[in-house]
């Protein structure tokens, strides 16, 4: 078994999920800047060309971060990062989906249409004409999450979950590509400080 990984928020999410589980496994670094993930032999592992990919012992290649994290949760259930009960799993998946739709997707598309356009224009569909609006949508999503967080320590409740890991990795990525967290989002700023102090953050910095 091995994890094909690289730089970027999605690989960091899976690596942080693994670290928070207290687990480790062999890793293969993929040069996405050089386009290694967009040609063979990597495309035979993941025809969609994205990282990370978890290659199981039987040769099954699991791509897409949420699918990988679900597999890890089922095979390494402690500590529970998606939920130990049906209710907890549903709540975690709800918040994970919200983070994905409201922050991760528009933030990434905004970056690809602007600062990342020279790298991505020949690799994926980019929307330079919509980049500013996509970045605004991500900022609005973060402001909404700030209001919803309230006094909770974490998005889905009192304990760390996949939703927090996803949001943390994209907030960190946003800060690197010209989309920093608005300091007016004070609840998220305090949440970010808690997340940054976790061992999983240090292990994947």
Image: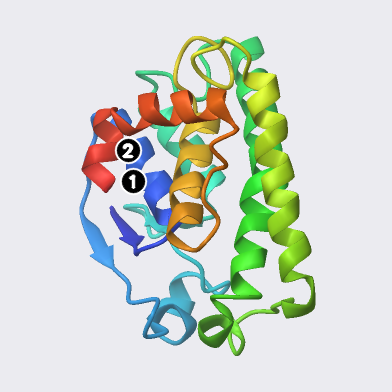
Q: How is the image coloured?
A: rainbow
* Mark 1 vs 2: CB contact within 8 A: yes
Which of the numbered marks, if any, corresponds to residue 79? none
Coordinates of residue 140 in the picture (x, y in percent): 73, 43
Q: Quadrant of residue 23?
A: top left
Q: Is residue 159 above or below residue 64?
A: above
Q: From the image, tell me which residue sits under label 1.
A: 15
Q: CA distance from mark 1 to mark 2?
A: 5 Å
Coordinates of residue 68 in the picture (x, y in percent): 47, 45
Left or right placement of residue 137 versus residue 31 in this view? right
Residue 49 in view here: yes
| Kind of element beneath mark 1 | helix
Coordinates of residue 47 in the picture (x, y in percent): 55, 75
Q: Is residue 7 above or below residue 87?
A: below
Coordinates of residue 136 in the picture (x, y in percent): 73, 54
Residue 97 in view here: no
Q: Is residue 120 above or below residue 134?
A: below
Residue at image point 27% right, 67% down: 29
Q: From the image, tell me which residue sits under label 2.
A: 18
- The number of discs equals 2
């Amino acid at each position: 078994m091995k994890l094909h990984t690289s730089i970027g928020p999605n690989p960091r999410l899976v690596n942080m999920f693994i670290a928070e589980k207290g687990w480790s496994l062999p890793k293969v670094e993929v040069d996405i800047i050089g386009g290694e993930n967009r040609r063979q032999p990597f495309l035979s592992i993941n025809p969609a060309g994205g990282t990370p990919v978890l290659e199981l012992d039987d040769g099954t290649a699991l791509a897409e971060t949420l699918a990988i994290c679900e597999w890890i949760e089922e095979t390494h259930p402690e500590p529970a990062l998606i939920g130990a009960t049906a209710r907890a799993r549903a709540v975690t998946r709800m918040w994970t989906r919200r983070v994905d739709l409201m922050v991760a997707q528009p933030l990434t598309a905004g970056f690809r249409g602007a600062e990342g356009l020279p790298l991505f224009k020949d690799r994926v569909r980019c929307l330079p004409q919509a980049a500013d609006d996509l970045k605004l949508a991500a900022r609005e999503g973060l402001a909404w999450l700030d209001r919803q967080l309230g006094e909770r320590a974490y998005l889905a409740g009192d304990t760390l979950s996949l939703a927090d890991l996803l949001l943390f990795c994209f907030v960190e990525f946003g800060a690197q590509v010209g989309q920093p967290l608005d300091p007016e989002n004070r609840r998220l700023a305090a949440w970010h400080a808690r997340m940054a102090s976790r061992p999983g953050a240090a292990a994947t910095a």
